[in-house]
Image (cartoon, rainbow, N blue to C red):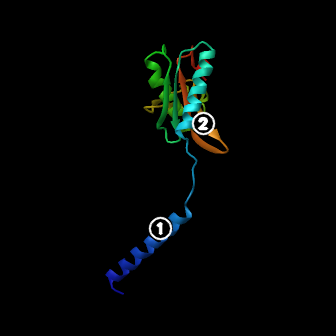
Amino acid sequence: MTTRTTIAALALGLTLAAGTAAAQGKFQVRLLTPETAMKAAQAALQHCRSQNMQVTVAVVDRFGLLQVLLRDRFAGAHTVDVAINKAWTAASFRQSTGELAVHTQPGQPMSGLRSLPRMLAAGGGLPLEGGGSNYGGIGISGGPGGEADE
């Protein structure tokens, strides 16, 4: 066998192996629909209004991409970015931002996570999960503190 033939055979073998691995590595994910994201945001906004809070609600998909943003009339300008970052954080870490606030305090092993650009470790962000699937996250900002937002 010449060197060229050996390289061609090796390349063909790698291509076939990669194709087989890709075929075996298939998986399915459930994605958040815009309609479901809107319903979640509207329900959160209504609940906050019933508590006399003017808030911004952000819903992101499982990839952290914004799907819905609802800002009540008197919610502060800063609440837009805060709600989006809370939703992103909850979706990314698949846990509430209130829990992350505790686990990322200075001196804790995970405190370095707070230096990530979109990470927001304050209450008000929750993962959206159901039936064993991660759908995304929802973030609320504008209440009197993270506990009220959450």
Tag 1 residue? 18
Question: Camera-side residue: 34 or 147?
Answer: 34
- Give the CA distance from mark 2 to mark 1: 34 Å
Which residue is pictured at 48% across the width and 15% down the height? 73
Residue closest to the far bottom? 1
Question: Camera-side residue: 61 or 114?
Answer: 61
Of tags 2 and 1, which is closer to the observer?
2
Q: Relative to residue 118, is residue 27 depicted above or below?
A: below
Secondary structure beneath dot 1 equals helix
Q: Position of residue 99 (x, y in %)?
A: 61, 29
Q: Which mark is residue 128?
A: 2
- Going from the N terminus, do you reach mark 2 or mark 1 first? 1
Q: Is residue 147 left or right of residue 3?
A: right
Q: Position of residue 29 (x, y in %)?
A: 57, 50
Secondary structure beneath dot 2 equals strand
Q: Relative to residue 36, is residue 52 depicted above or below?
A: above
Q: Quadrant of the N terminus?
A: bottom left
